[in-house]
Amino acid sequence: MAHLPGVSTTCLYRALARYAILRRTGADATFVMAVDKSGIAAHGHAWVELDGIPFEEPDDLTRYTVTFRYPSSVSSGNVEAP
C-alpha cells in the first residue's frame, strides 16, 4: 500500500492501516500514539502492539512517552451507543 501514488507513508497511516487489518482478522491489536521524551519539537510516533509487543516496529520506542492507547486497558475496543 505504501507504494501507491497518493498514499501517505507516515507512521500514523501505517499504524492505522495495520490496526484495522489486524482487528478485522481477529487479532487483539492495540493502536498507540506517543511523543518524544525530549520534548524538543514534539516529535510524535504511532504504532501497533500485539500482546503488548510492538508489531513490525523498527523504531526505538524507549524514547517516547505514550499519550494515547486504543483500546485502553479499561476498554474493549468497541464503541457503545449511550
Image (spheres, helix red, strand yellow):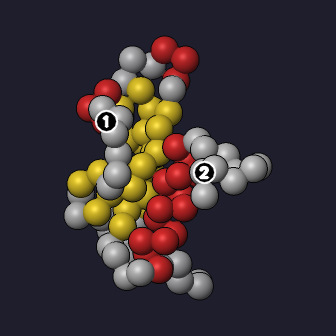
In the rendered image, the quadrant that contains the N terminus is bottom right
Q: Residues within 10 Å of mark 1 (few under 14, many from 20)?
A: some
Residue at horizontal 32 percent and vertical 55 percent from the top: 55
Q: Is residue 33 visible?
A: yes
Answer above or below: position of 35 versus 16: above
Residue at horizontal 59 percent and vertical 85 percent from the top: 81
- Amino acid under label 2? Ala
Q: Position of residue 35 (x, y in %)?
A: 45, 32
Q: Position of residue 47 (x, y in %)?
A: 42, 49
Choose top left, top right, bottom left or bottom right for residue 75: bottom left
Number of the front mark, 2 or 1: 2
Mark-to-mark CA distance, 2 and 1? 22 Å
Residue at horizontal 31 percent and vertical 36 percent from the top: 61
Q: Label 2, on which residue?
A: 2
Q: Label 1, on which residue?
A: 61
Which residue is outermost to the right?
A: 6
Q: Is residue 43 left or right of residue 25?
A: right
Answer above or below: position of 67 versus 18: above
Which residue is outermost to the front?
A: 3
Q: Is residue 6 left or right of residue 10?
A: right
In the rendered image, the quadrant that contains the C terminus is bottom right
Answer above or below: position of 74 versus 13: below
